[in-house]
Image (spheres, rainbow, N blue to C red):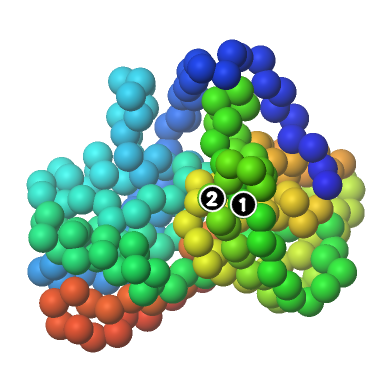
Amino acid sequence: MIAPRFQPVRPMSVIVDTFIAPPCTAAIETLFEDEQLLLINKPSGLLSLSGKNPLNFDSVHYRLVQDYPGCTLVHRLDFGTSGIMVVAKNKAINALLCQQFSLRAVSKAYSALLCGHLADDEGVIDAPIAKDPAIFPLMKICAASGKPARSRYQVIERLAQQMQGQTVPLTRVRLVPQTGRTHQLRIHSQLLGHPILGCDLYGGLLLPGCEQAPRLMLHASELDFTHPVSGEPMQIRCAAPF
């Protein structure tokens, strides 16, 4: 397993977030819209919600609320992750959609590029995840205090890519989180020994040639749920840009 570069330097009781998001010029793409909800493609490098630091005002919610004043995010994607998000246009729809998420009636799948070539074509990662203020913003695998976390992976292709003048082995995978823990797919990929390319927290920049990866190579590509008003099955797909 490749160790993360981040080293704990703060007391256990103190969490300080000094992250300042660089400007994101990419636009939010609308995949679907009706009177109740929006389905969007979030660009990598855009916060889902505005941060506490006033410099981190730009976000999915900040942009959308300009045109949809009552909209609320049903779920979030990490700053570096791109892909499908569902946005409720009012609180009542948000509550109905959140209920589906809490009951695990929503199916999600992600596309990712992992460092190295995976030996197995598919598998399951079952490892509990816990918060630890001493290593914020990282999460940790912890059998004693972690919450259950389970992810499935399936190899799509093994490839070699030229990066920084070096040939880098990569594996394109489909990742299916069966629980929804913070950083789950990132830390589970690291535990597998194949961190997500471009991941600055869990080893995805450590392989020679990967130091300048342009982004986190993780994209929410599939989302299945039931429309909260019509009852129709919604099967949304959005291909990864990498």
Q: Earlier in the sequence, mark 2 or mark 1?
A: 1
Give left or right: position of 93 versus 186: left
Amino acid under disc 1: Pro
Residue reaching furthest to the front: 144
Residue in front for this viewpoint, 34 or 136:
136
The residue at the point 74 percent across, 35 percent down is: 4
Residue annotated with mark 2: 147
Residue at image x 19%, y 59%? 94
Disc 2, disc 1: CB below 8 Å?
yes
- Dot 1: few (<14), some (14–19), or many (≥20) neighbours within 10 Å? some
Pointer 2: residues within 10 angstroms few (<14), some, or many (20+)? some
Q: Quadrant of residue 33?
A: bottom left
* Residue depicted at x 34% and y 54%: 75
Q: What residue is pinned by disc 1?
A: 128
Residue drawn where x is 87% and y is 41% of the image: 208
- Please tell me whether mark 1 sits on a helix, a strand or a loop: loop
Residue 50 versus residue 171 in the image, above or below: above
Tell me the SS state at disc 2. Answer: loop
Q: Picture coordinates of residue 86 (x, y %)?
A: 30, 62
The picture places residue 93, in percent across and down from the top left corner, at: 15, 63
Q: Give the position of the C terminus as an image quadrant.
A: bottom right
Mark 2 is on which residue type?
Lys
